Image: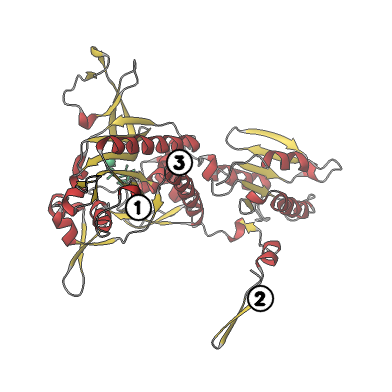
C-alpha cells in the first residue's frame, strides 16, 4: 500500500500513506461529538416515554426519532451497534454461516406464491414502481432467500448444509411502535436461513444455531432465557425464543421453578398451566421478557413452494429441510441498555460500549492546568502500546467544565473506564484516578499499572 497519489483522468487525489495516517490519527474529542441531547420527538410528551432505554437513549444523544417507530442511530449508538454486529458475525461464521445481503425491496409476486402477501396483513409496507409493479419492504426474507437458492437449480448434496445470513434493515408497519428501538417500524435484524438434506441434519443445524445464540448472549454478559414458542405467521413446526427477562418486556413467559422448562404464554392454553416435565402438581410461574432472538424449524414449507431440492444417491430429487433464525439487532442494543442501566445512567455490555476509556484532563485555568498535556500523553501512549484500543479512547477536552461535571457525564454514558488527570498526576509519582464504572471501584494507578489493566480489555 505504498501509494502516494493516484491520477484519475484530470484529477489528482493525494492519499496519505496509511502508516503516516496512523501516527497522525486525530484524538477522539468529546467537544466534537455529534450528540444532540435532551430533545423529545416532535409532538411527544415526556409521559409517553415510559421505558428506561428509550428515555436514556433519547436524552443522552444516542438516538433521535425521525418519525414514529423510526430512528436515527447517532454516532455513539452506531459504534455500539457495529460492535454488536461484529460479535454476531463471529458467532454466525463459527457455525459455518455465509454472509450475504438481499435487497430490501421484494416483489409482491414472490409473496403471493406463499400467500403471505395477504396473510401478513397491514404490517407489510407495500409500494408500487413506475410500471405499477407491486413490491414490499422486506419484514423478513424467507421468500427472497428460498427463491434465490432455487435459482441455482438442483443443489449438490456436497454443498449442504447451506447457512445463509444477513444483517439488514427490516420494515414492519407495527400497530404500536413503542419503546424506542425495542419495537420500531424500521430496524436491523440478523436473519439466517438454513438448508439441510433431511430432518435429522436440520435438527443438528437448529441446535447449533441455538448454541451460537447462547454463546453470543453470554459474551455480552446478558442474563437470558430460552423458551418454547409459537410458530406464528412464519410457520413451521418447532420454535424457540430467546428473551431478556425485564418488566418492560411485552411477552409473558411461563417457567417451571423445578426443572427450568420455559414457554411463551402464547403456546399455553389454560390459565392454570403446569409443567409438562414435572406433572400437573407443578404450576408454572410467569415473568415478562423482551424477545431478542427466534429460531424456527420450517421443514419444507418454503422449499416446496420454490422447489429447493438436491439429488440423492439414486438421482432422486428431494426437497431441502429449512430453518430460519432471527436476532433483533437494534432491539438487542436497546434491551441490553434496558436491563443493565440504572434510571439515570446508561450501562452497556462491556464488549460493545461505544468507547472503552475516557480521559478527563484538568480544567482550563485551574492550578492543575499543565495536566492537560499529561492527559494527551497518556492517550497517545495507550494508543501506541495497545493497538486494540486505537479507536477506543475518548478525551473529554471540554476544559471549561469542572472535572466533577465531566466525570458525571462519563458515568452517565457508561464508558467502562474513566481516567481523571488530577492533582496526583502532577506529583512525582504521577498517579491517575481510575474509576471502573461497572464495579464503581475507584483507585489511583501509575501509568504502567493503567496500561497493564487496559491491556486486558476485550474488544471486538
Ligand atoms: P414480536 O413478537 O416482538 O413482534 P416477532 O416474533 O414478530 O417479534 P420475528 O419475526 O421472530 O419477530 O423476528 C426476529 C427478531 O426480530 C425478533 O426476535 C425480535 O428480536 C426482532 N424484532 C421483531 N420485530 C421487531 C421490531 N418491530 N422492532 C425491533 N426488533 C424487532
Ligand atoms: Mg418472534
Q: Quadrant of the N terminus?
A: bottom right
Query: Picture coordinates of residue 78 (x, y %)?
Result: 47, 54
The residue under label 3 is 337
Dot 2 or dot 1, earlier in sequence: 2
The residue under label 2 is 4
Helix, strand or loop under label 1: strand
Labels 2, 3: front one? 2
Residue for point 71% across, 62% down: 23
For the question of whether residue 290 can be seen, the reply is: no
Residue for point 44% across, 40% down: 336
Query: Picture coordinates of residue 6 (x, y %)?
Result: 60, 79
The residue under label 1 is 187
Is the CB of mark 1 within 8 Å of ligand 1?
A: yes
Is 48 on the left-hand or right-hand side of 407?
left
Q: Quadrant of residue 445?
A: top right
Judge the density around disc 3: few (<14), some (14-19), many (≥20) Cα neighbours within 10 Å.
many
Is 441 on the left-hand or right-hand side of 138?
right
Residue closer to the observer: 242 or 318: 318
Labels 2, 1: front one? 2
Helix, strand or loop under label 3: helix
State how far apart marks 1 and 3 are (Cα): 16 Å
Amino acid at each position: 500500500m505504498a501509494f502516494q497519489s493516484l491520477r484519475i483522468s484530470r484529477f489528482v487525489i493525494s492519499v496519505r500513506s496509511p502508516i503516516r495516517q496512523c501516527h497522525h490519527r486525530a484524538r477522539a474529542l468529546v467537544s466534537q461529538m455529534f450528540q444532540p441531547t435532551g430533545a423529545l420527538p416532535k409532538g411527544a410528551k415526556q409521559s409517553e416515554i415510559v421505558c428506561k432505554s428509550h428515555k436514556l437513549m433519547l436524552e443522552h444523544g444516542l438516538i433521535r426519532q425521525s418519525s414514529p417507530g423510526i430512528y436515527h442511530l447517532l454516532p455513539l449508538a452506531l459504534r455500539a451497534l457495529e460492535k454488536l454486529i461484529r460479535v454476531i458475525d463471529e458467532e454466525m461464521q463459527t457455525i459455518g454461516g455465509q454472509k450475504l445481503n438481499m435487497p430490501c425491496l421484494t416483489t409482491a409476486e414472490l409473496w403471493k406464491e406463499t400467500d403471505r402477501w395477504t396473510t401478513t396483513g397491514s404490517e407489510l409496507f407495500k409500494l408500487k414502481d413506475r410500471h405499477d409493479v407491486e413490491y414490499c419492504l422486506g419484514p423478513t426474507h424467507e421468500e427472497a432467500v428460498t427463491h434465490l437458492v432455487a435459482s441455482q437449480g438442483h443443489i449438490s448434496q456436497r454443498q449442504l448444509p447451506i447457512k445463509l445470513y444477513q444483517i439488514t434493515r427490516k420494515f414492519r408497519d407495527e400497530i404500536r411502535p413503542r419503546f424506542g428501538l425495542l419495537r420500531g417500524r424500521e430496524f436491523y435484524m440478523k436473519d439466517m436461513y438454513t438448508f439441510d438434506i433431511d430432518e435429522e441434519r436440520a435438527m443438528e443445524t437448529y441446535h447449533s444455531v441455538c448454541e451460537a445464540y447462547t454463546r453470543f448472549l453470554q459474551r455480552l454478559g446478558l442474563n437470558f432465557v430460552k423458551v418454547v414458542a409459537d410458530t406464528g405467521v412464519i410457520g413451521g413446526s418447532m420454535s424457540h425464543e430467546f428473551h431478556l427477562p425485564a418488566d418492560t418486556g411485552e411477552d409473558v413467559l411461563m417457567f417451571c421453578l423445578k426443572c427450568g422448562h420455559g414457554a411463551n404464554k402464547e403456546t399455553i392454553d389454560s390459565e392454570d398451566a403446569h409443567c409438562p416435565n414435572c406433572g400437573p402438581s407443578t404450576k408454572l410461574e410467569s415473568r415478562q421478557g423482551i424477545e431478542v432472538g427466534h429460531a424456527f424449524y420450517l421443514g419444507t414449507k418454503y422449499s416446496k413452494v420454490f422447489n429447493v431440492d438436491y439429488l440423492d444417491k439414486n438421482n432422486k430429487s428431494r426437497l431441502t429441510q429449512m430453518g430460519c433464525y432471527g436476532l433483533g439487532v437494534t432491539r438487542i442494543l436497546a434491551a441490553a441498555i434496558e436491563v443493565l442501566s440504572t434510571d439515570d445512567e446508561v450501562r452497556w455490555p462491556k464488549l460493545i460500549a461505544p468507547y472503552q476509556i475516557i480521559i478527563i484532563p484538568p480544567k482550563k485555568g485551574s492550578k492543575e492546568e499543565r495536566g492537560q498535556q499529561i492527559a494527551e500523553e497518556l492517550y497517545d501512549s495507550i494508543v501506541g502500546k495497545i493497538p486494540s484500543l486505537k479507536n477506543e479512547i475518548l478525551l473529554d477536552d471540554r476544559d471549561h467544565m469542572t472535572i466533577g461535571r465531566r466525570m458525571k457525564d462519563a458515568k452517565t454514558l457508561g464508558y467502562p473506564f474513566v481516567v481523571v488527570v488530577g492533582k496526583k498526576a502532577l506529583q512525582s509519582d504521577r498517579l491517575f484516578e481510575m474509576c471502573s464504572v461497572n464495579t464503581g471501584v475507584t483507585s489511583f494507578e501509575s501509568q504502567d499499572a493503567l496500561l497493564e489493566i487496559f491491556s486486558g480489555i476485550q474488544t471486538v
